[in-house]
Amino acid sequence: RLEEMRNRAARLVDVEDRAIEAGDTAIIDFEGFQDGVAFEGGKGENYSLVIGSNTFIPGFEDQLVGMKAGETKEINVTFPTEYHSAELAGAEAMFKVTLHEVKTRELPQLDDEFVKDLDREGIETVADLKADLEKSQEELQSREFEATAGGGAISVKVTGSKEIKSINISKDVVDPDDIEMLEDLIVAATNEALRKVEEASASAMSKLTGGLGNMPGMPF
């Protein structure tokens, strides 16, 4: 949990003394061409792309690795056959890419200053934070979460540690000729109960971190 909190508080800093690596953020201009002609929707400026996030089509991000700020490169790729644009699906293309900036994530030091920045009442030191995290985790694990499916015909309870506590099945839905439907309802109810655990865990973490957010992604 402590590492998760540090990751949430990470900031982007400029990289000036090396080439871009996987995990870095590239600020790029790009334009795509097919047979030498620019195609619609294939251009972007000052676009923020995390290398290795796989938000661009396969092969694009890998070919940026090794570039330095200020460089321009031509990248050859093939669009996936299931690509949403029928005109580009399975097609080869060339992207002209200019790398303006390279940024990397810098994690804060896990010290008392970091803890104070969380601005939580009564939490002043790393020791305080660790104790609070342990208490929060114990409280979550002691809770039970219940979900239903099939209009309440299936009821599933799980603990905060994601262990199934009980599964209750109404006799009215037990049909020997349709076991598949029963299985689907059990899976649906179990997944919903586990989703509630995740939601409670995320809510607890948000309170502990003072609302620190994650870095947003940008889809291609």
Image (cartoon, rainbow, N blue to C red):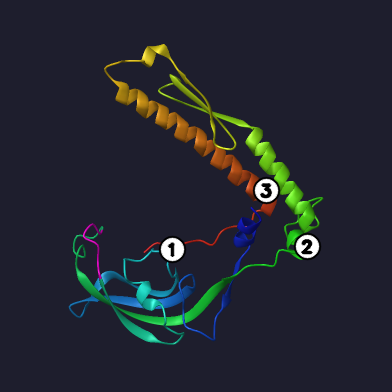
- Give the percent coordinates (x, y) of residue 68: 45, 85
Chain-order first, disc 3 or disc 1: 3
Magenta: main secondary structure: loop
Which residue is pictured at 55% across the width and 81% down the height?
15
The amino acid beneath tag 2 is Asp
User: Pointer 1: what residue?
Assistant: 218
Is residue 210 something that shows in the picture? no
Question: What's the mark number on residue 112?
Answer: 2
Chain-order first, disc 3 or disc 2: 2
Tags 3 and 1 touching, CB below 8 Å: no
In terms of depth relative to the viewer, which is nearer, 12 or 157? 157
Identify the image quadrant of residue 117.
Answer: bottom right
In this rendering, which labeled residue sits more in front, label 3 or label 2? 2
Residue 154 position (above or below residue 198): above
The stretch in magenta equals 78-83
Within 10 Å of disc 3 (Cα), the crowding (few <14, some 14-19, many 20+) is few
Within 10 Å of disc 2 (Cα), the crowding (few <14, some 14-19, many 20+) is some
